[in-house]
Image (spheres, grey):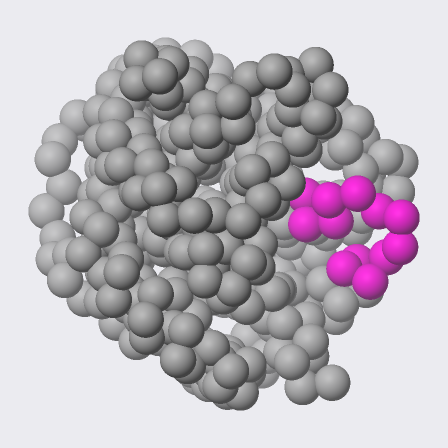
Amino acid sequence: MLIEIILALLLGCTIGTFTGLIPGIHINLIGIFLISLSLNLLSSIPPIYFVAFIVAMAIAHTFIDFIPSVFLGCPDTDTELSVLPGHKLLKKGLGYEAIILTCYGSLAAIFILMIIFFPSIFIISKIKNILPIIIPGLLIFASFFIISTEQKRSKALLVFFLTGILGLCILNFENLNQPLLPLLTGLFGSSMLILSIKNKIQIPPQKITKPKTKIFKPLLGALIASPLCSFLPGLGSGQAAIIGNTISKANRKGFLILLGATNTLVMGFSFISLYIISRTRTGAAVAIKEIIGKIETNILILILITIIISGILAFFLTKSLAKFASRKINKINYTKISITTLFFLVLVVFLISGFLGVIILSISTLTGIYCISLKVKRTLMMGCLMIPTIMLYLL
């Protein structure tokens, strides 16, 4: 049985690498596919192997998916904020550093998770009833804080509420599969790709250097924000990062560490949420619940061990892939890459969200370009998620 579990874990890391590298292919889609397979074609395989596979895939994905966000400007639904500081570092020849910073955050999150895993089970089970009261206040405070840091506050307010209204409209569409895909891809991905094509951005040679920055403050922000966002609907890594940055006030490099940490911590805490209150917060947790049902202590221990091993493997995988991408990215025509990537994103949106998804992608792309032209922080476009989430709790 041990050999089979190890093979399932390695296969999960492999698939998580591919889902992380390919924009638009989220682990939620793989989770849904696995649920259907496990109920039919793979019903003879013990569920414990599926657990090891899903957890390894999910953790590896949280490391790898920053690579296309930084090098191609194609965010996943959990890495949209990394496009902003990551792309700026890429244009300075520091794309490798940007990826490694997120790696540091993700790897630190693995060990933080191991330390606080069991204490957090006890604490959160005691305070889970007051979390819905705390979260709206934190998000409102974070929103006003982000807007107040801008010199052009009226424009900042416009961007925040414009994207917030867009998010409210799109997330309330019925019969739209994966509404976040066209929304976030347009605001943070295709808008930047189009501007890169228009401005004919040239990517300079990338330096393979070890980044230097303080990690304590961003990790503290991630540690406080991630558990809160992991136990409530409507909150994900993006909101956790904004709340965490409000607490830690990290610089550009620190923010990338915070993003890596929140991305991995939110995923890890989703398994805790499944264990404590049987609530699913991620596609990986949904898949495990559907396949195995209630999580027992032995399954929880397997999940913990899988998180540690897959996290360490994913760290070294990401470093190798980032080094390879850094050496190749300036040797190819970045404009052609951007055009190819843009067509690929439109195709993915069409296949997953249909023709309506392509329309939404177009609208959110134009909105993103307009917001970028106002020259305020692009994190303000996270109003597309923050305002709907605040409304969810207040109404």
On screen, 244 above or below 198?
below
Location of residue 319 (image quadrant): top left
Tell me the residue at 55%/17% (across/down). 45
Whether residue 272 appears in magenta in the rendering, the answer is: no
- Say left or right for 6 vs 292: left
Tell me the residue at 27%/60% (across/down). 118
Whether residue 176 appears in magenta in the rendering, the answer is: yes
Q: In this rendered view, identify the residue nearer to me: 384 or 220.
A: 220
Q: In this rendered view, identify the residue nearer to me: 234 or 102.
A: 234
On screen, 112 above or below 382?
above
Residue 153 position within the rendered picture, expressed as x and y whole percent measured from the top left: 52, 82
**Residue 324 visible, this orientation:** yes
- Say left or right for 258 vs 44: left
Tell me the residue at 89%/55% (across/down). 174
Residue 391 position within the rendered picture, expressed as x and y whole percent measured from the top left: 69, 79
Tell me the residue at 54%/49% (across/down). 294
Q: Which residues are magenta?
A: 170-181
**Which secondary structure class fits the magenta region best?**
loop
Q: Considering the image in quadrants, where does the C terminus appear?
A: bottom right
